Amino acid sequence: MLIKDKVVLVTGSAAGIGAELALAMAARGARALALADLDLAGAQVVASRVEKMGARAIAVQADVSVEADVRRVIDLAVGQFGCVDICCSNAGVATSGGPEASDNAWNATWAINVMSQVYAARHLLPAMLERGSGYFLNTCSAAGLLTSPGAAPYAVTKHGAVAFAEWLSITYGGKGIGVSALCPQAVRTPMLEKSISGGNKGSATLSASVIEPELVARYAVDGVESDTFLILPHPEVADYVLRKATNLQRWIEGMRRVFAKG
């Protein structure tokens, strides 16, 4: 889908990948952006930068783990701009641990990393299907294709996010709805820094490089405009996925060695 003159909704837009997605969408000619985040002040700063680029923008405080908040953001965007053409469900949380992690941690990670994307689709699809046009850019992470040592809630929910994006694309791709799953590895964002400072290197242990969020955003907008389902800002992830699919047992044994090295 061409981004020019489209209305774009971005969640998790106050910093990191979300902020850069908003700026990249504006640079490609989006006419308006709705920017949602728990950090309203941060989203307002990004909205101001977007407006200086010539697009309209609103910043909305929202908790995307709550369906009513997701619907409110969508209603505000539609009320201000007439529709939502492209939804970037980018908000996410990195949670470390395994089975010992609390139910609250597991449930919160599921709600943010998966259900927020379900809520967005639930409330946007009817109008998109009626128009015969719409796009979902869902930030999923390479952890959803591979794993994330030391962070079971993150890895499991990101697998769920990839699965949901696949389902959306298969079910609605023939009805004018585009879907992309954005799957970077380590990106220099506040979330990565918090994860590493907490003792969990996560996907960073699998990657030869930590890349900047601006690069992820460039991959993302190119992927949307070329209707690419799987967007890989770390191209080496494609090789990892192929190795995993070709010999799962060998891949698991290799990952055990990676995890053992810390």
Image (spheres, rainbow, N blue to C red):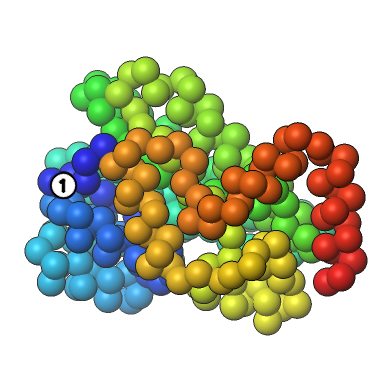
Q: Residue at x 38, y 52 (%)?
A: 220
Q: Residue at x 13, y 46 (%)?
A: 5
Estimate how packed mark 1 is, as few (under 14), some (14 to 19) or many (20 or more) residues with alpha carbons within 10 Å.
some
Give the x, y percent position of residue 38. Answer: 43, 66
Q: Is residue 169 left or right of residue 240?
A: left
Q: Residue at x 35, y 75 (%)?
A: 42
When the figure is inspected, residue 241 is found, relative to residue 40, above or below; the finding is: above
When the figure is inspected, residue 53 is found, relative to residue 178, above or below; the finding is: below
Q: Which residue is mark 1?
A: 4
Give the x, y percent position of residue 259. Answer: 84, 63
- Residue, far bottom: 197
Q: Residue at x 51, y 35 (%)?
A: 165
Q: Secondary structure at mark 1?
A: loop
Q: Nearer the viewer, residue 254 or 56?
A: 254
Give the x, y percent position of residue 228. Answer: 40, 38
Quarter containing the C terminus: bottom right
Quarter containing the N terminus: top left
Q: Nearer the viewer, residue 239 or 12?
A: 239
Q: Is residue 78 visible?
A: no
Q: Is residue 152 visible?
A: yes
What is the three-letter code of the residue carrying label 1?
Lys
